[in-house]
Each structure stands twice: as structure tokens, then as C-alpha cells.
Image (tube, helix red, strand yellow):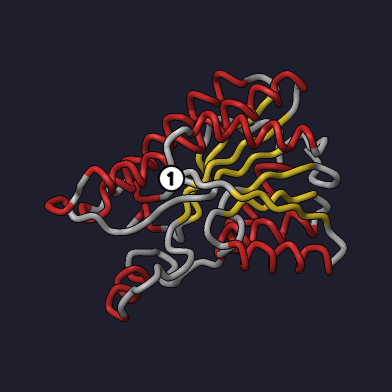
């Protein structure tokens, strides 16, 4: 699929990796729909940056942490239809991430992770995926996490939510074939987590074969490949983790 002229919906697009993906795809000629929840100022700044570069961008506010995900997704679809926007590519990037040690896990931790990291991307992928299938063309990309293969005990709700999204990715790839390709990207240490200590940063680097952090452009390049690089890839996960899995 050529990126030029396509409409791409990116959840959690205002900051960090989502921002880099949005800028990269806009520079390739895509019209970008910037979803955000609390980062309104950053989302507006991103849209302004894209427009100043000659690209097209629109804003979409939605809070996936609240109950009623399926209704919210249908509301998003109806709004985009009113704006005569058909989503060609969906990138489920939004997620909640924070530590939850085993002894301190509670239902709020669990619901936070499952609603934002699993339930919302699943329903978005289902609804927009069915629309894509009816048009006989579309791409869905899920941003996962390399730690689904190396669970950290202090982040179990997060990792379980991403593991569920991995399973959903594989199932959706089958259900939406042959016209829609559904894939995942599993980032490793791309950006320093907020609040990381110098010791934690050092340990994160040492756990990679390349002995360094990656950059959001590494994820953007992987996204671009899954959109434009091949239409013969589906139901797979592309690790972008600096060799963490071989350490």
C-alpha cells in the first residue's frame, strides 16, 4: 500500500513514539488523524507542525480509560464518516504504563491497563478492520512490547494487557484476511521511561545487544515498512528491541 494520499488514525499520537510516527507518515504524504486524551496542547502543536510542513492533520479527543469502549468507538466512526474520512491505516499506539508490584496490584491497576492497552485497540481494530475489509484494503498495526516474552514481575498488569493484544493481533489477522493486513511491532528500550534512575537506565542499556537506547524513528521506520514495504506480511510481530531477546 502506498502511504501517499492515505488516511492514518494514530492513537496516542501527541507525544513520544506516536508523535514520531505521525510526523514520519505525514512527510510520506499521509493525512494523519491525531488521537489524544489528556495531551491536548501537545496534539495541537503536532498538528501545527504537520500543517506548517504542508501536510494534513486533524485532531480526535477520546478517553479510552472509561467504560463503554464499544460505544466510544462507534462515536469515533460516526464522526469520521461525517467528515468523509475513511481510515486506511489504524495504528494502535496509545497505552498506559506504570509499575504495579504483585503485592500492590489492585482492580484499578488492572482496569486501567486492560481498557486502554487491550480493550480499546481490540474494538478499534474490529470496527475499522471490518470497514477496511468491506473496501478490500487496509492495514492495522499494534504497538506491543518486547517484554511479553520476558515478563517483569513489577509490571504484570501492563505485560498481560500487551500479551492479550498480541493474541488479538494474530486472531484479527486471520479474521480480516485476505484484504486487511494486521501486524504488531514490539519495541524495546526506545525512550527512557519517566522517572528512571541512572542505575535503571544503565541496566536497560546493558540488557540490549547494541548497548544503547533506540529512537522513536526506529519504530516509525518499522511502521512505514509494514504499510508500504510489503503487502505480503500479516499476523506477525516485528521486534525493534536492540537485541534484547538474545541477551
**Residue at the spot 77% in from the left edge and 22% down from the top edge:** 135
In which quadrant will I find the C terminus? bottom left
Q: Can residue 234 be seen in the rendering of this structure?
A: yes
Total numbered badges shown on the rendered structure = 1
Residue behind mark 1: 65
Vertical position of residue 191 compared to residue 75: above or below: below
Element on which disc 1 rests: loop
Q: Where is residue 161 in the image (x, y as percent from the top left)?
A: 36, 41
Q: Nearer the viewer, residue 141 or 36?
A: 36
Q: Is 55 on the left-hand or right-hand side of 60?
A: right
Q: Which quadrant holds the N terminus?
A: top right
Q: Is residue 15 above or below residue 61?
A: below
Write down the quadrant of residue 220 in the picture: bottom right
- The structure residue drawn at horizontal position 37% and vertical position 40%, both measured from the top left corner, is 114
Relative side of 158 to 2, left or right? left
Residue at 82%, 55% (x, y): give it.
56
Question: Around disc 1, counting alpha carbons within 10 Å, would you say few (fewer than 14), some (14 to 19), or many (20 or more)?
Answer: some
**Is 111 placed left or right of 235 in the picture?**
left
Q: Which of 192 and 11 is in front in this view?
A: 11
In the current view of this chain or complex, which residue is farthest to the bottom?
198
Q: Residue at x 49, y 37 (%)?
A: 120
Residue 189 image position (x, y, % from top left): 43, 63
Percent across and percent down for residue 202 are 32, 76
Q: Can residue 88 be seen in this view?
A: no
Amino acid at each position: 500500500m502506498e502511504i501517499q494520499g492515505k488516511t492514518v488514525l494514530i492513537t496516542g499520537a501527541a507525544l513520544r513514539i506516536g508523535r514520531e510516527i505521525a510526523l514520519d507518515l505525514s512527510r510520506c504524504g499521509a493525512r494523519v488523524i491525531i488521537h489524544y486524551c489528556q495531551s491536548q496542547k501537545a496534539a495541537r502543536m503536532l498538528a501545527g507542525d504537520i500543517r506548517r510542513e504542508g501536510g494534513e492533520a486533524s485532531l480526535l479527543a477520546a478517553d479510552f480509560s472509561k467504560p463503554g469502549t464499544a460505544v466510544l468507538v462507534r462515536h469515533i466512526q460516526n464522526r469520521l464518516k461525517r467528515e468523509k474520512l475513511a481510515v486506511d491505516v489504524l495504528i494502535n499506539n496509545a497505552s498506559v504504563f506504570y509499575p504495579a508490584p504483585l503485592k500492590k496490584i489492585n482492580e484499578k491497576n488492572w482496569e486501567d491497563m486492560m481498557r486502554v492497552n487491550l480493550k480499546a485497540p481490540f474494538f478499534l481494530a474490529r470496527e475499522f478492520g471490518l470497514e477496511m475489509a468491506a473496501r478490500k484494503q487496509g492495514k492495522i498495526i499494534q504497538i506491543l512490547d518486547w517484554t511479553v516474552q520476558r515478563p517483569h514481575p513489577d509490571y504484570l498488569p501492563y505485560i498481560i494487557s500487551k500479551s492479550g493484544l498480541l493474541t488479538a493481533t494474530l486472531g484479527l489477522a486471520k479474521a480480516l484476511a485476505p484484504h486487511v493486513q494486521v501486524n504488531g511491532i514490539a519495541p524495546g528500550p526506545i525512550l527512557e521511561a519517566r522517572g528512571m534512575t541512572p542505575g535503571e537506565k544503565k541496566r536497560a542499556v546493558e540488557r540490549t545487544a547494541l548497548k544503547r537506547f533506540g529512537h522513536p524513528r526506529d519504530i516509525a521506520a518499522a511502521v512505514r515498512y509494514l504499510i508500504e514495504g510489503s503487502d505480503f506480511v500479516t499476523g506477525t510481530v516485528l521486534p525493534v528491541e536492540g537485541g534484547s531477546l538474545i541477551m
